[in-house]
Image (cartoon, rainbow, N blue to C red):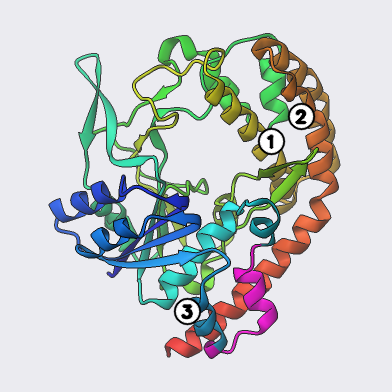
Amino acid sequence: MKISIGVITKDFNSLEPIDEFLENASKYNHKIYSVIIVYSHGCDFRLIESLEKNVKVFLVKINDAPEMKHQLIKMGLSAENIEILLDCPALKKWGKVPYGLNRNYALIKALLSGSEALVFIDTDVYPRVLIKKDDEVKEKEIDFIGRHLEYLRKEEVIITTSDYSGYYIIPPMSFAGMKELFTGLQKEDAYEFLRNFDQHNCLNLDNNKKREIFETDKILGGNVAIKLSALKELPPFFSTVHNVNGDNVLSRGEDTLLGIKLKKSEKKCIDIDTKIFHNTFGNYPEVPDIKKDKSIKDRFYYTCLGWIGRNPFLNWLKEEDIEKIKNRQRKNIIIGSKAVASYLNDERFLILPEALEISYHNLERVISEYKNTMRAWNDFIKKLEKWGG
C-alpha cells in the first residue's frame, strides 16, 4: 500500500514531528510513499530540501496550487467546482483557512499523486504513547503505521483512527455553573471527565497492552488513516470560519462529517486504541493552569467559539430537532458563560450566548456551503475514477 503522510500547517518552519514519524516508520520497516505538506502562509524551503533527501515531498500552498488546478482542469472539472474545492476566500479576507478545506487539499493531492492511503498527523503529535508504569507516567514508542495498517488492510475498513494521550484540550477547572457551560457547548462528556480532574489532572493515558479495538464514528484528524481506494464512500472534510463581533473564528469538528457519513455506509471506521502523544499546550509534563497561563485561557476561549460554530451544522447533519437543542443550549450557555467569565476573570466569555445566536443565524449559509462542497467533491471523485481508469 502506497502510504502518504499528510500535514496541514499555517507556517512550515520545523521538521518536527514529521522527522520522528519517518524514523518511526523506517524502524518498523514501513516505506512511506510521500509526505504532503499543505500550508497557507510561510515555508522554510531549506527544510523541504532536507526532507526530500529521505522521501518524496509534495508541497501545496492554499490559494496557490497551479499544478493541482491544472490536473483538475485536465480531468474535466468545471471552473465552478474547482473554485469550490480550491478557493479559500477566508484566507484572502482574514488570513484564516477552515480546517476542512486545509485537509481536503491534502486529500486531493494524495488522490492525484498515486497514494493509496493517507495518514494525517498534526504538528504537535508524536509516534509514541503515554503509559503508566510502576505508578509513573512514561513515554513509549509504538509501531504507528503498523497499527493503522493492521486494520486498514481489511476490506471492510475505510478509516482507522484513535484519540490522544497527553493533556486534554480542556484543562483542569472547577466552578459552579461548569455543568451548564459544557451542556451549552454540547460537551457533556467533557464535564463528566472534568468533574474528577483532581484524580487525573486531565491527563489521558494510553491503554498500552490492554487495547480495546472497536467500531466508531468519532474521527480525530490528527491521528487518522484513510484508505483512498474506497472513493465512493469517502466524503470530504468540512468546516467553516465564522465571525463573532469582528473576530474570525475557525469552527471545529471538520472530521465529524466523515464519521456521521460513514455510519450510514457499510464500510467501517475502526478505533485502533493507540492514543499517540499530543503535546497539547506545548509544555508537557507541566500541568496546565488556565488561571495563570494566558495562552491556555486564550486557547480554551477559541475552542469554545469553535464548538459553538460547529454545533448547529452538526445538529442539522444528525437530523436532530434544531429548535429544541438550540433552546437547551441557550438556557445553559447563558448561565455557563457568566460562571466561566467570573471564574477566569475574563469578560470575553460573556459573548458565548451571542456567538450561539450568530452560529444558528449562519446555519442556512453553512448548509449551502456544505452542499456545494459535496457536489464539487462528488464530481471530482467521478472524474477521477474515469481519469484513473
| Image position, residue 3 (x, y; %) | 30, 65
Location of residue 153 with respect to 170 vertically, above or below: below
Q: List the residue tagged with mark 1.
A: 305
Q: Per the image, is 215 magenta?
A: no
Along the horizontal axis of the image, is 78 left or right of 119? Answer: right
Measure how far apart labels 2 and 3 are at the Cα level.
42 Å
Query: Residue at the location (47% across, 46% down)?
Result: 220
| Picture mark count | 3
Q: Earlier in the sequence, mark 2 or mark 3?
A: 3
Location of residue 333 with respect to 211 vertically, above or below: above
Q: List the residue tagged with mark 2.
A: 352
Cβ–Cβ under 8 Å for marks 2 and 1? yes
Q: Is the stretch drawn in magenta largely helix, strand or loop?
A: helix
Q: Amino acid at mark 1?
A: Leu
Q: List the residue tagged with mark 3.
A: 67
Q: Earlier in the sequence, mark 3 or mark 1?
A: 3
Q: Amino acid at mark 2?
A: Leu
Q: Amino acid at mark 3?
A: Glu
Q: Earlier in the sequence, mark 2 or mark 1?
A: 1
Location of residue 201 with respect to 152 vertically, above or below: above
The residue lying toward the viewer, choosing from 338 and 270, is 338
Q: Per the image, is 80 magenta?
A: yes
Q: Secondary structure at mark 1?
A: helix
| Image position, residue 196 (x, y; %) | 50, 13
| Image position, residue 211 (x, y; %) | 30, 37
Please state, as top left, top right, bottom left or bottom right, where the N terminus lies in the image: bottom left
Q: Is residue 262 visible?
A: no
Q: Local crowd at mark 1 within 10 Å, few (<14), some, or many (≥20)?
A: many
Please state, as top left, top right, bottom left or bottom right, where the C terminus lies in the image: bottom left
Image: magenta residue range: 74-88
Measure how far apart labels 2 and 1 are at the Cα level.
7 Å
Along the horizontal axis of the image, is 185 left or right of 106? Answer: right
